[in-house]
C-alpha cells in the first residue's frame, strides 16, 4: 500500500476537505480534522497541517495538491537542516566516531574568535551525555565552564584563538571573516587528526557553503576534505560538534574576561548598545588605539563608540 504525506496551509486543507465532501467518514482518529474514503484511497487531514493519502490511489489523489504543499520533514530527502549539498552528513552520523568543529566570537565586537575541534569516539557518547554535553545554546556561562573543564580532560581536542590584533591586521589586508574561520577550522581539525588513530567522519558546523569553504582554503598546504561533512545546527547532530562548541565558548568567555580584567572593565558580549558604551569609555580613558587589542575594529560599533566618546568629551 502506498502512502503520501503532505503539509498544507489551513486554506488548502479546507479545499481538500471540500473536494472529498461526499466521501467523508465519521470515524476520525485523534488530532484529525477529517477522514475521507474513496474506493482507492483514505485521506486523513490533521490539525498539524499534515495530510495523509493511503491506498493504491494515494499518489494520484495527492498529486493535485503537491505544488501547494511544503516539503514534510522526516522521510523527505530534501531535509533543509543539513543542506542539500554533496557534503550533507549521512543519516546515522550521530552514532559514528567523529571530529566536530565550531567557532565562537564572530559576532562579538569584543574578544577573539575561538575555534575548537573535538573528537568523540562512539563509545564515549554515553559518558559525554553524562557530563552534560549537549547543544549549548541555552546554557549560561557557569554551566559552560563546568562542562568544558571536564570535557578538556576527557576528549582529544584542539583550540585555536585568534587574538584581536591579529584579526584586525588580517582584516585590514582584505581577508574576510569567513576565510579566517575556514583557516582556523582546517587547522584545528588537522591538530585533532594527529592526536587520534582513526575516525569515521568530520562534521563542521556550517558557516559557509562547502564550495566557498574550500575556496577559502585554496593554496593551503593541507586541506582536509576526506570524510568532511557540513551541516547547520550541527551541534544538534553530533556530540563532537556540541563538545567543540562548548570548548570554543569556554575559551571565549575566559578570553573576554581576561581582556576586561586587564583594562579594569567588564567587556559585554555581542554587538549591541552596551558594547558601544563600554567601547566609548575605553576610548575616553585610553584613546582610540586601545580597541585594536580588544575588539574587531571593522564592526560598526567602532564608529558608534567614537561618536559617543567625542560627544562626552565636548560636554
Ligand atoms: Mn557554529
Image (spheres, rainbow, N blue to C red):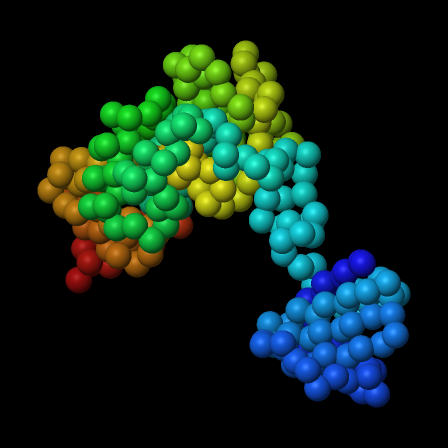
Query: In this view of the protein, which residue sits in the foreground, 244 or 309?
Result: 244
Q: Going 62% across and 27% down the picture, which residue do you hit?
A: 215
**Residue 171 location, x and y as percent?**
44, 32
Q: State the residue in front, 218 or 92.
A: 92
Asked if 182 appears above or below 11 in the picture, the reply is above
Q: x, y (%) of residue 221?
A: 54, 12
- Count up the numbered dots: 0
Asked whether the viewer can see residue 313, the reply is yes
- Residue 109 as seen in the image, left or right of residue 15: left
Vertical position of residue 103 compared to residue 220: above or below: below
Residue 171 in view, yes or no: no
- Residue 98 percent location from the top left of the image: 48, 28
Q: Which residue is at a point 86% across and 63% down the rendered structure image? A: 56
Q: Residue at x 29, y 39 (%)?
A: 130
Q: Nearer the viewer, residue 237 or 281?
A: 237
Identify the image quadrant of the C terminus. bottom left
Quarter of the N terminus within the rendering: bottom right
Q: Quadrant of residue 8?
A: bottom right
Between residue 270 and residue 58, name the one nearer to us.
58
Horizontal side of 224 relative to 118 (left or right) equals right
Amino acid at each position: 500500500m502506498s502512502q503520501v504525506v503532505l503539509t498544507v496551509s489551513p486554506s488548502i486543507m479546507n479545499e481538500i476537505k471540500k473536494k472529498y465532501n461526499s466521501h467523508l467518514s465519521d470515524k476520525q482518529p485523534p488530532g484529525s480534522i477529517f477522514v475521507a474514503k474513496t474506493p482507492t484511497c483514505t485521506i486523513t487531514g490533521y490539525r498539524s497541517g499534515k495530510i495523509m493519502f493511503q491506498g493504491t490511489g494515494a499518489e494520484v489523489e495527492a498529486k493535485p495538491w503537491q505544488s501547494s504543499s511544503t516539503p514534510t520533514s522526516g522521510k523527505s530527502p530534501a531535509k533543509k537542516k543539513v543542506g542539500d549539498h554533496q557534503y550533507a552528513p549521512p543519516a546515522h552520523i550521530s552514532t559514528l566516531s567523529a571530529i566536530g568543529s565550531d567557532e565562537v566570537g564572530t559576532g562579538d565586537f569584543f574578544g577573539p574568535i575561538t575555534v575548537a575541534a573535538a573528537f568523540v569516539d562512539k563509545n564515549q557518547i554515553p559518558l559525554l551525555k553524562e557530563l552534560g554535553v549537549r547543544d549549548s545554546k541555552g546554557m549560561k556561562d557557569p554551566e559552560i565552564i563546568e562542562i568544558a573543564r571536564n570535557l578538556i580532560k576527557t576528549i582529544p581536542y584542539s583550540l585555536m584563538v585568534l587574538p584581536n590584533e591579529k584579526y584586525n591586521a588580517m582584516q585590514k589586508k582584505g581577508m574576510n571573516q569567513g576565510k579566517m574561520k575556514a583557516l582556523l577550522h582546517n587547522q584545528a581539525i588537522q591538530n585533532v587528526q594527529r592526536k587520534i588513530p582513526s575516525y569515521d567522519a568530520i562534521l563542521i558546523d556550517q558557516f559557509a557553503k562547502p564550495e566557498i569553504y574550500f575556496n577559502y582554503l585554496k593554496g593551503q598546504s593541507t586541506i582536509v576534505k576526506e570524510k568532511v561533512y557540513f551541516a547547520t545546527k550541527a551541534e544538534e547532530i553530533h556530540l563532537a560538534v556540541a563538545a567543540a562548541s562548548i570548548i570554543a565558548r569556554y575559551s571565549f568567555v575566559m578570553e573576554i574576561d581576561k581582556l576586561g580584567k586587564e583594562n579594569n572593565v567588564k567587556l559585554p558580549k555581542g554587538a549591541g548598545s552596551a558594547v558601544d558604551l563600554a567601547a566609548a569609555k575605553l576610548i575616553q580613558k585610553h584613546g582610540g588605539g586601545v580597541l585594536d587589542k580588544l575588539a574587531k575594529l571593522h564592526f560598526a560599533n567602532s564608529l558608534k563608540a567614537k561618536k559617543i566618546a567625542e560627544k562626552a568629551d565636548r560636554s
